[in-house]
Amino acid sequence: MGYRVAVVGATGNVGREMLNILEEVKFPVEKIHAIASRKSIGQLVSFGDQNIACEDVEQFDFSKVDVVLMSVSGSFSKEWSPKIGAAGPIVIDNSSAWRMDPDVPLIVPEVNPDDVEWANRKNIIANPNCSTAQLVVALKPLHDRAKIKRVVVATYQSVSGAGKEGMDELWDQTKGVFVLGAPEPKKFPKQIAFNVIPFIGAFRDDGYTDEEAKMWDETHKMIDPAIKLTVTCVRVPVMVGHSEAVNIEFESPLDEDEAREILREAPGLIVIDKREPTGYITPKEAQGEFPVFVSRIRNDPTVENGLSMWVVADNLRKGAALNAVQIAELLHQRGLIRQKAIA
Ligand code: 2RA
């Protein structure tokens, strides 16, 4: 017996990955629906070896499904997730709309799986921002051992985090540079081809960006509000895969060898850490993969109990679609998805 599943925002980068991953992990799907906005009605998207036609979100009867994976804008989710949740299915939302709502659990299954138990407050579960998801998978097992005091992070975020338009802009500018000159930036504020941009999202009054604030807010909600984080988020000319240079100060001693062993044993992580010219992970190698990869684990002798490391993941997978599907699997394992007879 499977579930009736709907993916809302099925034509986007993350929506398409949600469909791919539901099929790859063999999530028990009895009936799948691809839902999109009016302009994409009838557009075909693939689910395994089937092509399914997108249905209109305005017309769709959400009481006919058990679980809904949403990959839509925050404003769309604000309006639609409560309506869908009230119709019956559990909503797993990838937008920023619900992440900090005290009645909505924000979940990375390797980090805080038990929070699914109170998902029935609003029938909505939030997926974290892509750069937070990979960070917390790496921080949690270390925090459990030696309590993290402070984290300094610089991100190197791929253009796919800004959607298909971001990928098209990098591609067009890269080609254009060699022909007529790079086209003017549209999606990003400056040229992204052959460049890096230390600005993602929108500025706040304190000079940080909202993308940076998401990393500490979400880490506080999922792991521990006592952890201090300072963050610089940077867009880089990489198609898929976010990287992070992470420096950590612990309350008690934890050296690089023990940290490496802890991370090797931790769920959802792969350590690739050889001190040779190719002994680390890059985003190109993480693309299409499920785990979070950790490399370059080393003591930081400039602070007491300090450690530095390099953390990489596929932002469309662990940073978004895979995490959402893992939440659905967790709900399934705990018997928390309502099963209703097919109408
Ligand atoms: C980005 N964090 O990379 C965003 C996507 N959620 O732009």
Image (cartoon, grey):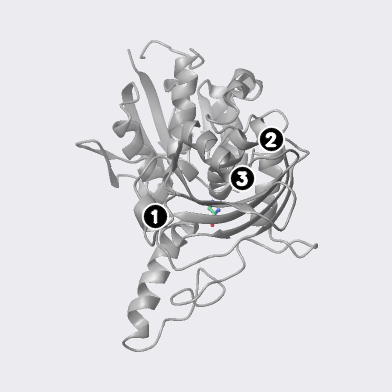
Q: Disc 1 marks which amino acid?
A: Gly
Tell me, yes or no, whether the two marked residues, 3 and 2, touch with CB atoms within 8 Å.
Answer: no
Reply above or below: 97 against 168. above
Q: Which residue lies at the image location 32% right of the left edge and 86% below the top edge?
A: 178
- How far, Cα to Cα, is label 2 from label 1? 26 Å
Q: Which residue is mark 2?
A: 146
Rate crowding at label 1 as few (under 14), some (14 to 19) or many (20 or more) other CA atoms within 10 Å: few
Question: Residue 95: in sight, yes or no?
Answer: no
Q: Which residue lies at the image location 66% right of the left edge and 30% below the top edge?
A: 104
Question: Of the residues tagged 1 and 3, which is closer to the observer?
Answer: 1
Q: Which residue lies at the image location 53% right of the left edge and 30% below the top edge?
A: 110
Q: Secondary structure at mark 1?
A: loop
Q: Which residue is mark 1?
A: 279
**Between residues 330 and 103, which one lies in front from this camera angle?**
330
Q: Which residue is mark 3?
A: 96
Residue 57 at x, y percent in the picture: 45, 38
Q: Secondary structure at mark 2?
A: helix
Tell me, yes or no, whether the two marked residues, 1 and 3, touch with CB atoms within 8 Å.
Answer: no
- Dividing the picture into quarters, in which one does residue 283 lie? bottom left
Q: Secondary structure at mark 3?
A: loop
Q: Disc 2 marks which amino acid?
A: Ala
Q: Disc 3 marks which amino acid?
A: Ser
Reply above or below: 335 against 75. above
Circle on res. 265: none
Residue 85 at x, y percent in the picture: 56, 26
Q: Is the residue marked 3 within 8 Å of ligand 1, measured from its CB?
A: yes
